Amino acid sequence: MIYKKRSCSQIVIILVALIVFTFTACKSLNQKTTAEAGLKDVSEFPIGTAININKLINDQALMALQISNFNSITATGDMKMRSILPFENEFNWKKADTLLYYANKHNQRLFGHNLIWHSSTPKWVEEKGANDSLWLGEFMKDYIHKYVGRYKGKVAGWDVVNEAFESKGGAYRKTFWYNNLGKEYIANAFRYAHEADPEAVLFYNDFNIERDTSKLDAVLKMVEKFKKEGVPIHGIGFQMHIRMDTPNEVIAYSLEKAAETGLQIHLSEVDIIFNSHNDERLGGIENYSSITNEMKLAQAEKYKNLVLMYRSIVPKEQQFGITFWDFTDRDSWIKGFFNMKDWPTIYDDDLKPKPAYYGFLEGLKVEIEKK
Ligand code: 9MR
């Protein structure tokens, strides 16, 4: 190897160049950090996302965005009964444990979704419970005690019962649980969860309650009854799977009504679509097959307004947080589930922030009159 001798003036030039380079690099890094303050950094309440833990830990780009934006995490499917207890006596804690490890490592709140949901009841439970409601009642108690007990003090809150009312109107959904245990199963699930972890914040979680006032009334009636009877319910989860044409006035009214209960309010599964989903889950209606700039800006405005409504209507001490249901259009459940195109989230298919991201961010930052 040949080392060239450098003159003194050459060395000085190199040193100056190095100093200038280092200074510029540091400055631009600092600027980047400030410019890229994530959603959680400008929010007064937790900002969460639901996610599939395996997808998350195997995708560096997704993980970087998740860490910079969120301080709360929910499993899309990994903490449901079908995942936790797929076969009799075969508890599968692996993914929930990984989620907990991840949440702790990145200083995020772990939210438990969910304990009882008709759509995630394992087949073996349905078969066994259909002929034996005594067994089913005991099973539910044991399951909740064991599960919530295992994560006592580690999972901050739970969706104890999910979607116990019909999609529309105020009737209880005639689910496997309802048919075999009667509507008491709901109150009992809350009691068991509270016994297992008295500190956990316990939610009833449902969809359409931001737009269907009959359904909301029925949920609120149940909540009031629980409060009167001492059933330990602490929060209402508005899934908030909304559409661009869901009127803001109705959303505001619903949040106001729910906030009057004094309970925690969680926007628990937020996304905003352009097309129509069918609530009976028979597919969607695809009115838009591509997205224009104008649509992107309108969505940004809708996201901004949603945060503003949450901030201005829900009193600070009741703001449990806002959680996205996946945060990229690439990963959102909407397209697959309703078999239609859509752009429901704040990041696009290439993991780039959409105007919706900046709308949401703006909604968090704008000064408002405090409640
Ligand atoms: O997004 C979730 C999807 O990945 C799961 O396969 C599915 C079944 O477990 O559940 C989806 O999440 C639902 C949530 O648990 C309850 N509200 C509606 C959500 C979308 O279907």
Image (cartoon, grey):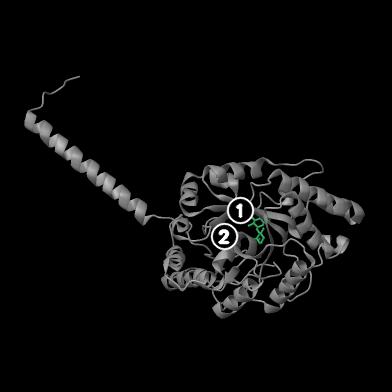
Q: Are marks 2 and 1 in contact (CB under 8 Å)?
A: yes
Q: Earlier in the sequence, mark 2 or mark 1?
A: 1
Q: Residue at x 61, y 41 (%)?
A: 98
Residue 122 appears in the figure: yes
Is 362 on the left-hand or right-hand side of 255?
left
Is 67 on the left-hand or right-hand side of 200?
left
Under tag 2, what secondary structure? Answer: strand
The foreground one among 219 and 211 is 219
Pointer 1 local density, CA inside 10 Å: few below 14, some 14–19, many at least 20: many
Residue 245, picture quadrant: bottom right
Taking the image in four quarters, ligand 1 sits in the one at: bottom right
Up-down: is 130 above or below 219?
A: above
Is 106 on the left-hand or right-hand side of 179?
left
Give how far across and how far down residue 263 sits, in percent.
Answer: 65, 66
Q: Amino acid at mark 2?
A: Thr
Is 158 on the left-hand or right-hand side of 67?
right
Give how far across and how far down residue 259 sits, in percent.
Answer: 62, 71
Residue located beneath label 1 in the image: 74
Up-down: is 123 above or below 166?
A: above
Residue 323 numbered tag: 2
Q: Residue at x 64, y 72 (%)?
A: 258
Residue furthest to the top in view is 1
The foreground one among 97 and 354 is 97
Quadrant (top left, top right, bottom left, bottom right) of the N terminus: top left
Residue 367 numbered tag: none
Q: Amino acid at mark 1?
A: Thr
Up-down: is 23 above or below 250?
A: above
Give how far across and how far down residue 92 sits, in percent.
Answer: 72, 41
The foreground one among 231 and 249 is 231
Numbered marks: total: 2
Cα gap from disc 2 to disc 1, whole angstroms: 8 Å
Give how far across and how far down residue 111 sits, in percent.
Answer: 62, 53
